[in-house]
Amino acid sequence: MKSKRSSAWVGIVDDDESVRMGLSSVLRSAGWHVIVYPSGDRLLGDSRRSKLRLLVADIQMPGMDGFALLEAIALWKRPVPIIFITAYATPEVCKRAETHGAAGLLAKPVSDVQLLTMIEEILEA
């Protein structure tokens, strides 16, 4: 029997390549399959998106921000949970993320342990 971890795909959406590559490396080393995207538009246009079980997405991105991405994903036949990451974790942003249905929010720089724990909790639920 395969574990959930070995079969689950996690998407990372961030306009900063170093963040995408760093998070991707952490998640892959923990055993997750990962697909990275430089923008929400690229994710929405990717045929592989149906594999995803969870997203880690920046809020502040040019074009489609994280909240617009969250709204778009809510319309999917099978929406996936989103963990937001942001350098601007103000009380207002945290409240907005909670109100709009984000699965979690972490401040940048992201703690690897916190991120892995949050992903584990969400996907094991």
Image (tube, grey):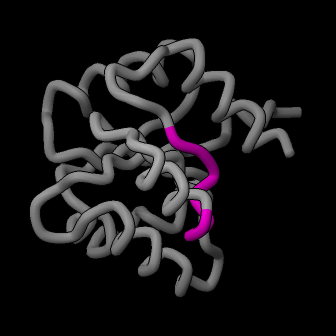
Q: Nearer the viewer, residue 36 or 107?
A: 107
Seen in the image, is 100 located left or right of residue 85? Answer: right
**Residue furthest to the front:** 91
* In the rendered image, the vertical position of residue 121 relative to residue 29, given as above or below: below
> Viewer-proximal residue, 88 or 124?
88
Name which residue lies at 60% across and 67% down. Answer: 99
Q: What's drawn in magenta, residue-wise?
A: 99-105
Please state, as top left, top right, bottom left or bottom right, where the C terminus lies in the image. top right
The location of residue 101, given as percent across then percent down, is: 62, 65
Residue 55 lies in magenta, yes or no?
no
**Where is the N terminus found, in terms of image quarters?**
top right
Location of residue 6 in the rendering, given as x and y in whole percent from the top left corner: 67, 31
Left or right, 32 with reference to 12: right
Residue displayed at 13% across by 33% down:
17
Residue 101 magenta-highlighted:
yes
Left/right of residue 73 with respect to residue 41 in the rendered view: right
Q: Quadrant of residue 51?
A: bottom right
Query: Across the whole image, how many numbered discs are drawn on residues?
Result: 0
On screen, residue 11 above or below 74: above
On the image, the x and y values in percent for residue 37 come to: 25, 51
- Indicate the position of residue 42 as horizontal and vertical percent values: 22, 65
Q: Residue at x 66, y 31 (%)?
A: 118
The residue closer to the viewer here, 29 or 101, is: 101
